[in-house]
Amino acid sequence: MPNEFNQQIIEEFRANGGKVGGPFEGARLLLLTTVGARSGARHTTPLGYLPDGGGRVLVIASAGGAPNHPAWFHNLVANPLVTVEDGLFTYEARAAVLEGAERDRVFARAVEADPGWADYQARTARVIPVVALQGVDGGPPKASSAGETLKLVHDVFRRELALIRKEVTESGAGLGAQLRVNCLTLCQGLHNHHTGEDIAMFPFLAGHRPELAPVLERLGREHERIAVLIEELREVLSAEGADPPLVLAEVERLTDELERHLTYEEEQLLPVLGT
């Protein structure tokens, strides 16, 4: 029988491009669909996740510290090919249960970021599994137009930057390993997005809408400025004993520049791309 609370989250997530309210407002959330180990039926579960870079995300089978693994974990052990929804894309992924030192290192990273994971582990005798989800087959954006896709992508970056600012502010004296990964994953995502625009979308628009030349030139210059800010943030993150106030200052510089850029791009291109 479907869990009514989970079903409400799933419906809200799908209706709002990955945004939900209530206890999970502002959290990193995905929808994981597994195939039942016994039934063969598809089951969808909302889960918090941790960025891991390289197109890989991590989920933790805590079940709130319950004595048994959650059903979704048993399902993906039996059938490792799963479906992931992140609010923008729906894609196939291969699930791999982390073992030994790798599991312990990643779980420690999660605990450093959120001590609640340690509380869950303390409640149960089982070793709480950590699962890596690696995309193997991408799907189209969940949008009806290029403009809607662009706005959804922008909003993902806005949410992630807001979350990272909050995490850095609350990080205390040291910058945890998971927070570094979060920042670096964001940096790579921005780089990939702007590179894609530079080599594909902007040349296409320039060829079909020559009147947009001044807009595209400005957006290209802004990409260059943002690339410098991304590299400066990476340098601060790579320093031994990275100082949270310095990291926060770089994140805020990037946020301010990026928000101006995203707002201008939306004002100029959404009417052309459709919404």
Image (cartoon, rainbow, N blue to C red):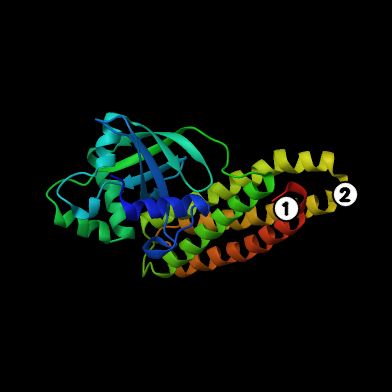
Q: Quadrant of the N terminus?
A: top left
Residue 53 visible, this angle: yes
Taking the image as shown, residue 67 lies to the left or right of residue 172, namely left
Residue 238 visible, this angle: no
Q: Quadrant of residue 142?
A: top right
Crowd rating for badge 1 (residues with CA inside 10 Å; few <14, some 14–19, many 20+)? some
For label 1, the residue is 270
Q: CA distance from mark 1 to mark 2?
A: 15 Å
Q: What is the x, y in percent for residue 51? A: 42, 49
- Above or below residue 55? Residue 251 is below
Residue shown at 31%/29% (left/top)?
A: 40
Q: What is the x, y in percent for residue 212? A: 83, 50
Residue shown at 47%/70% (left/top)?
A: 245
Q: Quadrant of residue 37?
A: top left
Looking at the rendered structure, the kind of residue marked 2 is Glu
Asked whether 109 or 266 is in front, the reply is 266
Residue shown at 67%/44% (left/top)?
A: 145
Is the residue under label 2 in contact with that under label 1 (CB below 8 Å)? no
Asked whether 108 or 64 is in front, the reply is 64
For label 2, the residue is 211
**Mark on residue 192?**
none
Select label 1 or label 2 by which is in front. 1
Q: What is the x, y in percent for residue 19? A: 48, 57
Taking the image as shown, residue 143 lies to the left or right of residue 11, namely right
Looking at the rendered structure, the kind of residue marked 1 is Leu
N-term mark: 1 or 2:
2
